[in-house]
Amino acid sequence: GMAVRDLETKLVRHAAPTLAGMKPANLFSYRTANFTEEEASSAIAEISSRLAGFHLRVEPLANRARGVLLLVFRPKLVEGALSNEHARKLLTQSGFKDLSTEGVVSEIKRRIKLLTHRAQHLPYLVRDVDSLSREELETTQGESTFPHEIGLILGYPPADVAGFIAQKGTGYLACGGWKAYSEPQSALETFQRNRRCTEEFQALYAQGAPLEALADTRSGAAVSIFDMARAAV
């Protein structure tokens, strides 16, 4: 129904690089004000089921008064990102015990829930859905700090995640999908590739390409953008 179509549109808009297999994960807020809780839950379940065969998962991290914080990820790519030595060190220093994909995702989820309980005055974690990739990493309220380690799942370089935490979001070298504290040129190129991917996928979806075709990294649509991204490296 309408809720499913709305969620599809949001996925293409906010998670195209993950659909394309260029990025391990995307995080965005699925605003559900226009639907009942049941319709929204049903839409998430249906999309999850449809994407499961393409090695994609849609994980609700937290419910908000105005929507659901959704993590869309490719477990294999997340596993690769988390196997990085610097990523593992950062997670261990941040008190993560289980460094598997499942372990890190569930601990992030637990910390977000804890934040919600501590900061009831924060009606919504994310203020601006369009710049969410940056915004949700900067939501800090007193002692209740958003688990910035989620940046590792989203494929941000560990040095940038560590830099953000250490410098509390100031003093960055480049800013786009995230705040870069190392290799700004490489980050800027990635921001540009992700933008181009999003534009291409939105155009394909508007022309009638089904979500499954965009999620299938072996399909023409996904392969063309993926090859383009690799050629640009």
Image: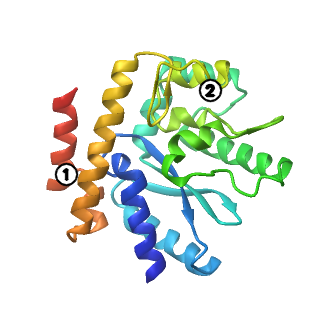
Position of residue 23 in the picture relative to residue 221 (left or right) = right
Q: Identify the residue position indicated by label 1 in the image.
A: 218
- Is the residue 1 above or below the residue 182 in the image? below
Q: Position of residue 222 (x, y in %)?
A: 22, 51
**For the point 17% across and 38% down, which residue is it?**
228
Position of residue 218 in the picture relative to residue 80 (left or right) = left
> Label 2 neighbourhood size at 10 Å, few (<14), some (14-19), many (20+)?
some
SS of the residue at dot 1? Answer: loop
Visible in this render: residue 219? no
Q: Identify residue type, mark 1.
A: Arg
Q: Position of residue 191 (x, y in %)?
A: 36, 34
**2 or 1: tag closer to the N-terminus:** 2
> Label 1 neighbourhood size at 10 Å, few (<14), some (14-19), many (20+)?
some
Q: Identify the residue position indicated by label 2 in the image.
A: 169
Position of residue 129 in the picture relative to residue 23 (left or right) = right
Visible in this render: residue 201? yes
User: In the rendered structure, are the residues bearing label 2 and label 1 in contact, judged by CB atoms less than 8 Å apart?
Assistant: no
